[in-house]
Amino acid sequence: MELLQWNVEPTEFPQVPIPEDCPWGQKARAMGLAALYPHQVAVMDVCQRLFQENRSAFIFVPAPTGSGKTLAAYLPVLTCLTDDGPKSLGVYPTNALIDDQFSTLYRYADRLGWDRRKDIQILHAQALDRLAAQVVDPSRIDLIAHTLRSARVVLTNPDILFYLTFFLYPSVGGSLWDAVAYLASFDLWVLDEFHLYDALQQACLFWTIGVRRRIVRSRPTVALLLSATPRASGRLRRWAETLDLEWISLESSFRSMPPTPDGMTRVIQEPVELRVYPGDLEAWEDGAVFQESILPLWEQALQAQPRRRAVFLLESLADTLSFEELYRIRFPSRTVALRTGLVRRGSLEADADLIGNSAVDVGVDLTGDKKRDWLAAVARTAEQAIQRMGRIGRDGRRDPDPPNQVHLIVPGYVFRRLQYRRQQDVASTYTREQLFQMLRDAFVTPTDFEEAARDWAPVVIGAALHGYRDLIGPRDPERAGVWQEILESFRRWWGQDPQEALENFWRKYESPNPYQGLKQGLLSFRGRTPQVVLALRQRDGKWEPPAPYDLFWVLRKCSIEAVLGETEFLRWCQETYRWDDAEADLQRRALRRADPLAYVQAVLMAGPNRKVRLLIESHERSPKISLYRLRFHPCMYEEALRNGDGSLSQLLSRCEEQGVAYPGLLVSKSELARSDLPPLFESVACYVRGRLVRPGRDPYPYAGSMFIGRSAFLMAALLNRSGLSI
């Protein structure tokens, strides 16, 4: 197997003692801090200045892994000297990361005498479920309003923030307006892992913060954008200026620095031996690659150094679960921990090898007893490669024993570019900054979806304006000017009125009103697709806990055993998982929120046994809406070589009854293969019947790959920007 190899130097930051006369020094020392990194001091100084002068700003903070960004972000709140100081809202992309950050924050707040039950609160689905169990007949929005009203620091995810600020929650007796008003009381907004958001998501977050500044005049609005990417897009600066907020960048504060004369430095990223291998871009199967290429390397590593502990990071849930099962069979004497967004098994502190997916990237801190020294991961983008490399080597050692090893599998075109770079530059040792820049240069990123944001963000944001109008009260003379300022901000940003933006969007889609068919793909933060509640049976007969899954994933990856009603499914769950009545009620509430099409029992299929393929019907009664050659079609499925599957037919009938139709973008296999585009989104191999077949280009029956839902929108922008014909 081909490979490239580099040695990566450790990253060291100097530490600055906290001065005795520092106004907030006493509280910082009470938290157990004797010194800070320069960038932590820079964030603190800038925030203090902004709050003192009542100035609003976006602060771009490029924070490498292990650099203490959590402490930097919350120091202005934790060390505040007055009771009416700033309140902070932390926004994190995964619930696992929210829980991890809560533990870190609470350790500091506990030393200051904060009330854990009141001052720091978590606002995500599981926390709301726990709170609901303590209240009689609560509404979701009432629980959110209660959390926002009572806490000084709230940690939440962008999905809840989006539904709240775009008025998508059902209002119960004015609770929605109360919750949005309580949200406006937060002065410091911490947007972590900001590099993971696409342009449409960034636009929605910027708009929310800009509106807060308009509504709340007496206090500043300060937003910290924490990112693993060292440079911010020029688009973000322009957006900030359009919303009348300052743009402050602290890029220079985060550069790796040499040791200071007094020796007060700390290694935040240990040295690493990096090895890079080519993967198959056209048929990316994480589990197969790991089985064929990675496990033999791991066996060699164990023979040489049996004390090693590994972390394996795959992409899809299906491949992760299949690989875990294979790993347990192949290494029966090894302890295994599993971490995905839906399934958790085993303890990280034990002498265990960790298997996971993207939930580990931003939700598991592998330090101390949890540290690992051997990592294997797939990397579809430069940001993912950087994020995953940062999972190991965070214990502050200059010469770790055994040495840290990272094994990255990248798309073939990336490997070829890195190979060419290696031929031109024979250096075998790089700093992390140099290596990360080389990775960014190697991955193709033809667009950051700014074009997509220009098309769709005005429609999404415009849909929320009526909520702000009602919240502010246009009939109130004292606040009428605020509403006009919000409208003017919209016009300056997008160059059009909200109604004009809506009409232009309809016109581009060549349809009188496609909004109903598209709104679930647009009016959600990550893009919503039809959901089913699924209980997966593993090959050993054990059942995974039920959870909402994407319908298209279930149809492609599972052999369906039964489709049940809610009552029957929950009764089966109580018997299988031994839930008591309280747990059953809690689970029922959680599963209902997904608004599932059905409740399904299924077995995961793998490798050559996976036969489900997408079938697209195109005929006169099919609704056809176009944008840049993007097509929207009702999606139907058939299972090749498995005719007469009653359960599958039953599920498809449910879809048809409820009118499931989601946007889909069809790209021929040959065009995608030669485009050198990164596999940013999961696609579905599909068959086509009807007028979509193009003779001479897409031989029937196999036409290519289908991107579904939000992925269809974004991939359309990507392909059009690269000049491909679709």
Image (cartoon, grey):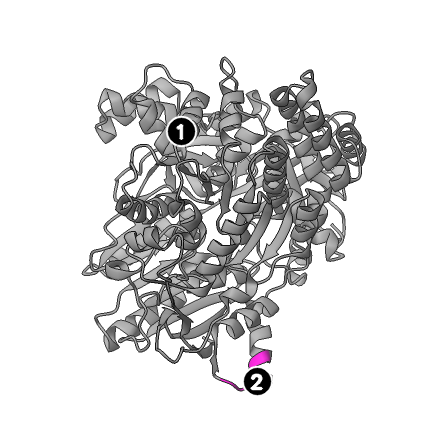
Q: Please report the residue visible at 55 percent of the width from the left and 54 percent of the height from the top.
A: 195
Marks 1/2: CA–CA distance:
55 Å
Magenta stretch encompasses residue 426: yes
Tell me where residue 679 appears, x and y as whole percent: 57, 56
Q: Quadrant of residue 267?
A: bottom left
Evaluate whether residue 24 shows in this view: yes
Tell me where residue 339 appears, x and y as whole percent: 33, 49
Residue at the extreme top: 173
Q: Which residue is mark 2?
A: 425
Amino acid type, label 1: Thr
Q: Secondary structure at mark 2?
A: loop
Q: Which residue occupies the foreground of this view, 113 or 541?
A: 113
Magenta stretch encompasses residue 307: no
Tell me where residue 263 appears, x and y as whole percent: 34, 77
**Would residue 147 appear left or right of 577 to someone viewing this image?**
right
Magenta extent: 421-427
- Closer to viewer: mark 1 or mark 2: 1
Q: Please report the residue visible at 57 percent of the width from the left and 38 percent of the height from the top.
A: 527
Residue 147: image tag: 1
Residue at the extreme bottom: 426
Q: Please report the residue visible at 34 percent of the width from the left and 72 percent of the height from the top.
A: 404
Nearer-N-terminus badge (1/2) = 1
Q: Quadrant of the N terminus?
A: bottom left
Q: Which residue occupies the foreground of this view, 662 or 537?
A: 662
The relative height of residue 4 versus residue 53 in the rendered view (above or below) is below
Q: Secondary structure at mark 1?
A: helix
Tag count: 2
